[in-house]
Amino acid sequence: MTKKKRSPKVSKLGPAKKRRLKDKSAGIGSSIAAASGSAAGTGGAAAFAKPLFPLRVGERVINPAALDPAMTPPGVGAQSGGDALRAGAVTPTIYPDSPLGLAIVQNYVAINFQTEEFGRFNKNIEALLAELRQSNEISGELRDQLVSELRAGREIISGPKPQRDLLDLLLVKPLKWLAEKSGTAIVSKLAADALGWLLKMIGAI
């Protein structure tokens, strides 16, 4: 049996209906173009509010999506990275790639532990710390902060390369405050004497 060939279907849409479909397609295209232009004109909507690529801060790469503004201290931008550290006065120690290398410390002071100045300074600091522990003239929190900073400074100055900025931060400033404002004669005298020996050691006087 011979199969009959099917003739192609002829659209039965009238001229009016064809015009309506054409107008509708044109309208959709215009809407898409307008939306794209709006996004470009406003610099991107909310989806483009954050950088699309990781941020490089110092030697670290941070994904912006992982940053939580709620965990950022007041006054520090979530994407500021190491800005606070770079703005500080203390330069971090540079450690070597090998455990046999040497640490690089900027602006360090060479301390001779055999000098009279170091011996006197040590004795004054020991006596001062003992006096602070029993003093009631200074509030508990302030006293504990002073003691902790003086102990940290004492450890720093006993190291091979004590940085001058750290000595100023942890020893000079608290000793000067205690010498002027401790409220007790014995604490003021011990702090003033320790400060005098310290300044001689680091060449400040």
Image: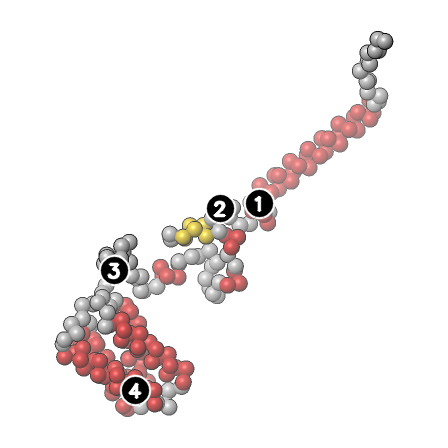
| Front-lying residue, 102 or 50 | 102
Q: Secondary structure at mark 3?
A: loop
Q: Secondary structure at mark 4?
A: helix
Measure how far apart labels 2 and 1 are at the Cα level. Answer: 15 Å
Q: Position of residue 22 (x, y in %)?
A: 75, 27
Q: How is the image coloured?
A: secondary structure
**Mark 2 vs 1: CB contact within 8 A:** no
* Picture residue at 40% right of the left edge, 52% below the top: 60
- Asked whether, in this view, residue 166 is left or right of residue 57, the answer is left
Type of residue at label 1?
A: Gly
Q: Which residue is mark 3?
A: 103
| Quadrant that contains the N terminus | top right
Mark 2 / mark 1, whichever is N-terminal: 1
Q: Position of residue 53 (x, y in %)?
A: 49, 46
Type of residue at label 2?
A: Phe
How crowded pointer 3 is (Cα within 10 Å; few <14, some 14-19, many 20+) is rated as few
Mark 4 / mark 2, whichever is N-terminal: 2
Q: Position of residue 189 (x, y in %)?
A: 25, 87
**Mark 3 vs 2: CB contact within 8 A:** no
Residue 104 in view (yes/no): no
Measure how far apart labels 3 and 1 are at the Cα level. Answer: 48 Å
Relative height, residue 80 to residue 180 (above, below): above
Q: Quadrant of residue 90?
A: bottom left
Type of residue at label 4?
A: Ala
* Picture residue at 21% right of the left edge, 76% below the top: 198
**Mark 3 vs 1: CB contact within 8 A:** no
Measure how far apart labels 4 and 2 are at the Cα level. Answer: 55 Å
* Picture residue at 33% right of the left edge, 80% below the top: 147
Q: Which residue is mark 2?
A: 53
Q: Which residue is mark 1?
A: 44
* Picture residue at 53% right of the left edge, 50% below the top: 50
Disc nearest the viewer among 2 and 1: 2
